[in-house]
Amino acid sequence: MNQSKYSFLINEKGGVTINSLTVTLTDPDVDEFKFYNKEILFYLDESDGIPMFRGYIRQINPSDKSVSLTAYDPRTFLTGKE
């Protein structure tokens, strides 16, 4: 049975720096294109009701064995090309 595995990294530098969340999925059957610009919420404990990170997926790095998704907090829309 093939189970999907994942890892994550939250980068919070503080101040006015944009926070990011990188998630790596080891499921090669994922259609990575459907994730771009989608909102992502990360809960340390979902019962709290408040996400530890909230952002939008802005970078996708596929490979043969995994897909890495990087999301940035909503301030990315203020500083980006949009």
Image (cartoon, helix red, strand yellow):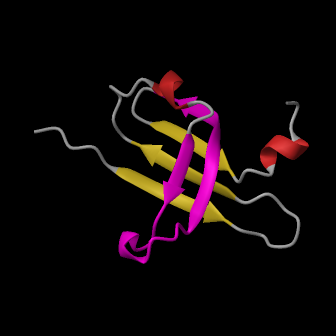
- Left or right: where 8 falls relative to 20: left
- Left or right: where 82 falls relative to 73: right
Vertical comparison of 39 with 48: above or below: above
59 or 38, which lies in front? 38
48 or 19, which lies in front? 48
Magenta stretch containing residue 42, yes or no?
Answer: yes
Which residue is pictured at 40% across the width and 74% down the height? 45
Vertical comparison of 62 with 40: above or below: above
Q: Which residues are magenta?
A: 39-63
- Left or right: where 62 falls relative to 45: right
Which residue is pictured at 41% across the width and 42% down the height? 25
Which residue is pictured at 63% across the width and 44% down the height? 56
Which residue is pictured at 36% across the width and 74% down the height? 47
Quadrant containing the N terminus is top left
Q: Position of residue 24 (x, y in %)?
A: 47, 46
Q: Position of residue 13 (x, y in %)?
A: 78, 70
Instruction: Give the farthest residue toward the left.
Output: 1
Magenta stretch containing residue 9, yes or no?
Answer: no
Instruction: Give the farthest residue toward the front.
Output: 49
Q: Position of residue 75 (x, y in %)?
A: 80, 52
Instruction: Give the farthest residue toward the bottom.
Output: 48
Quadrant containing the C terminus is top right
